[in-house]
Amino acid sequence: MTYQEKNNLVSLISTLVIFGFYFFNVYEMYQAGVLSTIAVIGLWVPVIIFTVVVHVVFNIINAIATNHEDTTAADERDKLIELKSTRNSHYLFLTGFFISMGFLMFSTPPLIIFNLLILAFVASEIFGYISQLYYYRKGF
């Protein structure tokens, strides 16, 4: 498995776990009726910290395990795979963006719209990671 595949897999799993935690807590606060801007900002602090920590730890473990201090530069194939997966994820984000803007017509509170946009962003990132893994496995 190449470094890019490992990095995508770690990013995919960490995104699922960390934002699963975030959306679970937002849903619990919404059900309890205590969803506020301060509470959402309070959830963002651990989300950002855990995301950074996971990627730093992965790079340290990968460097120790492979005895490499740097990774290989991306070639044309890597750039093409990244370009195609970015295209796929942007289409999904654009769809989620327009759906969340459609909720504005129904007088949805801004904090809910904000979380819908975050959901669209996270779903598009997950789809981008899955697309990259698919293209690497396909050999495209």
Image (spheres, rainbow, N blue to C red):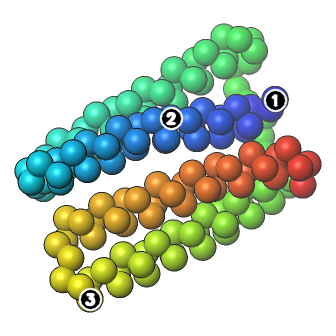
Q: Distance between the residues labelled 3 and 1?
A: 47 Å
- Indicate whether 41 appears above or below 101: above
Residue linked to disc 1? 1
Q: Distance between the residues labelled 2 and 1?
A: 18 Å
Seen from this angle, which residue lies furthest bottom? 105
Q: Where is residue 79 in the image (x, y as percent from the top left)?
A: 77, 55
Which sits earlier in the primary sequence, circle 2 or circle 1? Answer: 1
| Residue in the picture at 66% in, 66% down | 88
| Amino acid type shown at disc 3 | Met
Which sits earlier in the primary sequence, circle 3 or circle 2? Answer: 2
In the displayed structure image, the side of residue 26 where residue 56 appears, left or right: right
Residue linked to disc 3? 105
Q: Position of residue 57 (x, y in %)?
A: 51, 20
| Residue in the picture at 37% in, 59% down | 118
In the displayed structure image, the side of residue 2 where residue 115 appears, left or right: left
User: Disc 3 vs disc 2: which is toward the camera?
Assistant: 3
Q: Callout 3 environment at 10 Å: few (<14), some (14 to 19), or many (20+)?
A: few
Residue linked to disc 2? 14
Q: Position of residue 23 (x, y in %)?
A: 33, 48
| Amino acid type shown at disc 2 | Ser
User: Disc 3 vs disc 1: which is toward the camera?
Assistant: 3
| Residue 41 visible at all | no
